[in-house]
Image (cartoon, rainbow, N blue to C red):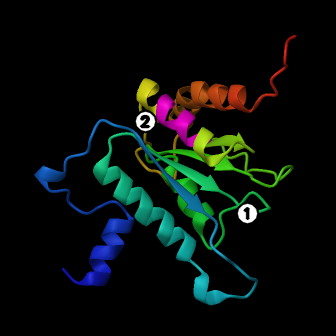
Amino acid sequence: MPRPLLLGLLALGLAAVPAWAAPTDVPRVAVLRSAPWSPGDSARDGAGEFAVFLEAARLQQAHRAPGLLAVCDRHGLLRSGGERALRRLVFSGIAVIKLAPAAGAAVDSHPGFLRGGTLSEARASEILVRCLDRHGPPPAAADPEKPTAAELAALRGHLEPFQAALDAAGAPHLALN
């Protein structure tokens, strides 16, 4: 198979998985960071999208319950096409947490994204792994580009305990004397 075609199939998660490389039951989370970007830099268009799809395909081949942790830029975005890829992946059975390390950055309110706020990468990853282990991966839409209202409702319902755990971890804790 030609190398560009193979890479494209891997990025879309369409490559065949050998029997000896069957996915494990252990949830796994990968951390993605926003690609360096500057206005008018057409050479990087799509680089973020490709990187996100490639990481997602790698996770899906190795684990039954994959998750992604997107560390966004100061605007709460994954640049160079990364946002497009994340929006598709949330309807493909992959849990996605978006972190905004810069306090006050608005994270996209897309219904499939989990909001991690300013939690540390380690804490957000730990919570996501625990939730994936307990609740399993989110349901996938038949067509990730056009999820139905019922698929959207199922996704929201499935992710409620995930968001509750993230909110509880990010809530200020009072010290009792």
The residue carrying mark 1 is 73
Q: Tags 2 and 1 in contact by the CB under 8 Å rule?
A: no
Considering only vertical position in the picture, is 40 above or below 158?
below
What type is the residue that disc 2 sits on? Answer: Pro
Q: Position of residue 174 (x, y in %)?
A: 84, 19
Q: Position of residue 169 (x, y in %)?
A: 69, 29
Q: In 3D space, how far apart are the residues under numbered discs 2 and 1 (Cα atoms)?
A: 26 Å
Residue located at (68% from left, 49% from top): 99
Q: Position of residue 156 (x, y in %)?
A: 59, 32
Q: Quick check: 84 left or right of 141?
A: right
Looking at the image, can residue 44 be seen?
A: yes
The residue carrying mark 2 is 137
Q: Which mark is on residue 10?
A: none
In magenta segment, residue 76? no
Residue located at (74% from left, 52% from top): 100
The C terminus - image quarter: top right
In magenta segment, residue 129? yes
Name the secondary structure under disc 1. loop
Label the magenta part by its dominant secondary structure. Answer: helix
Residue located at (65% from left, 56% from top): 71
Looking at the image, can residue 112 be seen?
A: no
Q: Quick check: 160 left or right of 104?
A: left
Q: Which residues are magenta?
A: 124-131
Number of disc labels: 2
What type is the residue that disc 1 sits on? Answer: Asp
Q: Quick check: 73 left or right of 17?
A: right
Q: Position of residue 113 (x, y in %)?
A: 62, 44
Name the secondary structure under disc 2. loop
Q: Earlier in the sequence, mark 2 or mark 1?
A: 1
Residue located at (31% from left, 69% from top): 9
